[in-house]
Image: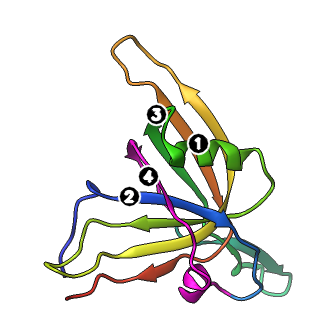
């Protein structure tokens, strides 16, 4: 097993997708194929992954609170980009924030073995916010977007050629 740097990671936005009662699988993102648009000038990609909500129950007879696992949430992924007014991916994020729909997202790692394919992550999310960050004179103008993840994370491992 080898670890890899975040450098070289790419994020993409696709079209709208409907919720499912079952977990998503790779075929949901490839059949029919999505049209993926890279979100460029990405500085930070945040995190995604399931966290179970705690469900507490206290039995009077044994005076013990039990913690059960409730519904899972994949959280909110925070994207930070250098503003590029001509970038189709950033424009798609801004447009998606104005809608109530879930969109397909793909994250591609920079971990492909020589001649092989890289690891990928797929999920659906609502673009919950988009804001511009200006900071100080020696800063890059930033576009910040929050993705409210509404599905499981489909993981595709890197493969040898």
Task: Answer above or below: position of 42 versus 68.
Answer: above
Magenta stretch encompasses residue 29: yes
Q: Residue furthest left?
A: 114
The local crowd at label 3, few if under 14, some if 14 to 19, many if 20 or more residues have their Cα within 10 Å, is: some
Q: Nearer the viewer, mark 1 or mark 4?
A: 1
Quarter of the image that includes the C terminus: bottom left
Magenta residues, dominant SS class: loop
Residue at position x 78%, y 79% in the image: 63
How far across and down, in percent of the image, does residue 134 sit?
50, 20
Q: Which residue is mark 3?
A: 84
Q: Are marks 2 and 3 in contact (CB under 8 Å)?
A: no
Task: Answer above or below: position of 101 versus 115.
Answer: above
Please identify the quarter of the rendering in which residue 30 is found: bottom right
Q: Which residue is mark 4?
A: 45
Q: Nearer the viewer, mark 2 or mark 3?
A: 3
Measured in 3D between alpha carbons, the distance from the residue under mark 2 to the one under mark 1, in whole angstroms, is 16 Å
Q: Nearer the viewer, mark 2 or mark 4?
A: 2
How far across and down, in percent of the image, does residue 113 sit?
17, 79
Q: Is residue 44 left or right of residue 14?
A: left
Q: Which residue is mark 2?
A: 10
Q: Are marks 1 and 3 in contact (CB under 8 Å)?
A: no
How far across and down, in percent of the image, does residue 133 sit?
52, 26
- Identify the mark nearer the N-term, 2 or 1: 2
Q: Are marks 2 and 1 in contact (CB under 8 Å)?
A: no
Measured in 3D between alpha carbons, the distance from the residue under mark 1 to the one under mark 3, in whole angstroms, is 9 Å
- Identify the mark nearer the N-term, 2 or 3: 2
Q: Which residues are magenta?
A: 23-48
């Amino acid at each position: 097993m080898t670890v890899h740097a975040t450098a070289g990671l790419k994020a993409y936005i696709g079209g709208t997708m409907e919720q499912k009662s079952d977990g998503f699988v790779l075929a949901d993102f490839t059949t029919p194929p999505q049209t993926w648009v890279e979100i460029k000038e990405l500085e930070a990609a945040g995190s995604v992954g399931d966290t179970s909500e705690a469900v507490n129950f206290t039995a009077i007879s044994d005076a013990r609170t039990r913690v059960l696992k409730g519904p899972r949430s994949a959280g909110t992924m925070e994207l930070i980009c250098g503003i590029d007014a001509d970038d189709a991916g950033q424009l798609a994020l801004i447009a998606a924030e104005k809608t109530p729909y879930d969109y397909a997202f793909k994250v591609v790692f920079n971990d492909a073995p020589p001649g092989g394919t890289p690891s990928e992550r797929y999920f659906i999310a609502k673009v919950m916010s988009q804001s511009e960050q200006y900071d100080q004179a020696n800063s890059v103008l930033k576009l910040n977007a929050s993705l409210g993840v509404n599905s499981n994370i489909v993981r595709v491992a890197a493969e040898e050629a």
